[in-house]
Amino acid sequence: MSRPVVRRLLVGALATTVVAVLGATAPAEGTGTTTQARTQARAKASTVVTPGDFTGYGFDQCLAPTQKAMNTWLQSSPFLAVGIYISGDSRACRSQPNLTPRWIRTQLQKGWRLLPITLGPQASCQPRFPRYGDDVTIKPRPGANGKYSKARAMGRAEAKKTVGVAADLGIAAGSTLWYDLEGYDNNNTRCRESALAFLSGWTWQIRELGYLSGVYSSAGSGILALDNARVNRPDVYTMPDQIWVARWDGRANTSTSYLRSDGWMPHARIKQYQGGHDETWGGVTINIDRNFLDVGRGSVADPETYCGGVRIGYGVYERLQPASGDYHPAKPKVKALQCLLQQEDLYTGPISGRYTKATIAGINSWQTQHRLKVQSVWTPRNWVSLLSEGADRPVLKYGSAGSAVRRVQRALKATAVSDAKMPIDGVFGAETTTMVKAWQRKVKLPVTGVVGYESWAALEAGKR
């Protein structure tokens, strides 16, 4: 968010929208609300909860990038998450010409994980705010009951405004909405306590309206205060569901000495580990901050079964051919081949593990369709082509998970660049990234570690 304390801002193009149907006054914390159903009904552009389950890299910048830039970075950068500021009167970039419901919908369809952020009222002792004169800061008075009720009410009001904008943009209920609280002086008691009260009101209201609450702040101020309150005063403030720590230590993880190891664990943290700098991917340069995310369940892939339990994942996919002399093709690998051909409607016989004429007919059909040498021998190149085949070809990179990742992992095993360190688990981690880069280098593709359209085409052609 804003430098030098934390980071630059990303803003929402529709951040000035105030949703009248949410009402002008929020209910007190702990009371019911009638607005949740109406809010969820308006978030129609997408049913994708964001960021969802994810462990990987993200970036943010002041202005939401153009679609062309997003497309280029999707294909070439290591990032799969992007911060977008959608609301808040104190944000640096009040105008966001690129940020529209269509922009949101397009990024989610392409696989980006979005981090919708608000920068509204800031801590009363933050010297850089108010920024414009028409924005306000958090009211620091404790009030007659000592509970900073006015600060809590401000947090609830900002949450209602943010949810309205999020729903209009098509950000689905269940997504995490983030509040950016810039760094401040934790030694100023009223400033700190009113900021915590504001965030407590924010979190309560965000949840009431069907979303998850996230808080971004510097490790030594807002995050430290939240963690201390979590441990020492658990009944005083409502804690956010997820936290986003600004700690520019250059370490791509979610740890910091300012935060206890058990806080928001497992899978409820983001860390901004590098501040503003230029990065160029695919010829497109953007000034960004870098982040590492571990949220939801982390990147996970659900179990899969094939052909009633046939194993199709192996460390090695060797050449297969009709039996002759002392040679007999390995039955488990033949079963895997028959299963995969059956899924492509090229084999209708039993999955027996026997290299039959029907199996060879299926092989020949595949080879013909993919302009491979038509023969009774099934080669490693044929394996690469078949193992990577599937209905979808999403952009995959560190943090991706699912059946498409498993297809790539199995195909890499047949390229002769893989090793035992890379599992076939459907999660695109460090080992898979290393193997993708090694294969890309071998087949003379741009070495990005990203499986984009060029890599999918090369895999389906059997390049190894």
Image (cartoon, helix red, strand yellow):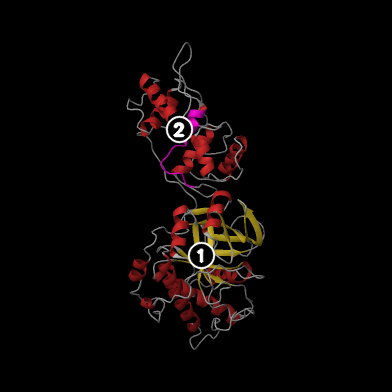
Q: Nearer the viewer, residue 402 or 66?
A: 66
Identify the image quadrant of residue 438.
Answer: top right
Residue 305 appearing in the image: yes
Residue at image mark 2: 386
Residue 147 appearing in the image: no
- Read off the magenta span: 381-394
Residue at image mark 1: 98
Identify the image quadrant of residue 417.
Answer: top right
Identify the image quadrant of residue 357.
Answer: top left
Q: For mark 1, give the secondary structure.
A: loop
Q: Is residue 388 magenta?
A: yes
Instruction: State whether residue 220 is above or below residue 402.
Output: below
Instruction: State whether residue 128 is above or below residue 347.
Output: below
The residue located at (58%, 49%) in the rendering is: 76
Q: Position of residue 106 (x, y in %)?
A: 45, 57
Q: Position of residue 271 (x, y in %)?
A: 59, 60
Q: Position of residue 82 (x, y in %)?
A: 54, 59
The residue located at (48%, 65%) in the rendering is: 241
